[in-house]
Amino acid sequence: MANPSATRKRKPRKVTAKSLERAALFYLERFATSAENLRRVLMRRVERSVHFHGTDREAGAGLVDGLVARYLASGLLDDRAYAEGRVRTMRRRGSSARLIRLKLRQKGVADDVVAGALADHAEDGTDPEAAAAAALARRRRLGPFRPPAERQEKREKDLAALARAGFSYDMARRVIEAPSPEDLADDEFL
């Protein structure tokens, strides 16, 4: 028979300045994040404390805002560096600029910071959108990465996969219709 105390859900602790700071630092140890996302994470903790303990929501929000401002001033939080890191990672995995903008907007990164990070990533001379589309095709085994017998049969499905990933029809068509994987790595394609 199960232990009834083990199945009972624990009540969250009451929020204090010290507990919020510990939670914020623990979160930052594990995850790179934006200022707005850290604010959301900490505010969820405050909301739970308000619900269970009746603490003051405005006081908790003030503590959260103070922590975020202090971490921004000290450099512990940097939306620009976070955006640049996410752009590099997502491009390598095959994400389109459209998807990157969406994901970073969801994390609370300002549009101008996202645009700057995307522009910085595009300065290396190659077309980052084409390189990302080729990376996604390689990872998902689409287009030229399929066995030749399946390519024509799966063409529409491959185009749809790239479209869902946020790539334009022209870019998806260029990748899917490439004669071979080596052609995708060619400088003319990128």
Image (cartoon, rainbow, N blue to C red):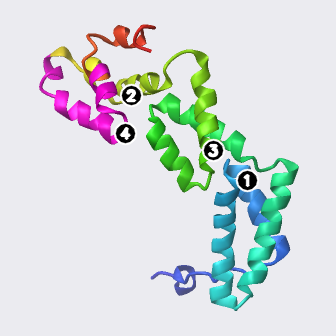
**Secondary structure predominantly adopted by residues drawn in magenta:** helix
Q: Quadrant of the C terminus?
A: top left
Q: Quadrant of the N terminus?
A: bottom left
Cα separation, mark 4 vs mark 3, equals 22 Å
Of the residues tagged 4 and 1, which is closer to the observer? Answer: 4
Q: Tell me the element at label 3.
A: helix
Tell me where the magenta segment starts and ends, as one range.
149-174
Would residue 67 be counted in the magenta stretch? no
Would you name the residue on which mark 4 appears? 165
Please, is residue 159 above or below residue 7 in the view? above
Percent of width and height locating residue 151: 18, 21
Pick whichever, 54 or 189, lies toward us.
189
The disc at residue 28 is 1
128 left or right of 49? left
Label 3: few (<14), some (14–19) or many (≥20) C-alpha neighbours in 10 Å: few
Q: Residue at x 51, y 44 (%)?
A: 101
Cα separation, mark 3 vs mark 1, equals 24 Å
Of the residues tagged 3 and 1, which is closer to the observer? Answer: 3
Q: Earlier in the sequence, mark 4 or mark 3?
A: 3
Q: Earlier in the sequence, mark 4 or mark 1?
A: 1
Percent of width and height locating residue 187: 45, 8
Pick whichever, 144 or 59, lies toward us.
59
- Amino acid type of disc 2? Arg
Instruction: Find out whether the residues at labels 4 and 3 contact each other: C-beta distance under 8 Å.
Output: no
Q: Residue at x 25, y 37 (%)?
A: 160
Cα separation, mark 4 vs mark 1, equals 29 Å
Q: Tell me the element at label 1.
A: helix
Instruction: Find out whether the residues at labels 4 and 2 contact each other: C-beta distance under 8 Å.
Output: no
Would you name the residue on which mark 2 appears? 139
- Amino acid type of disc 4? Ala
Would you name the residue on which mark 3 appears? 112
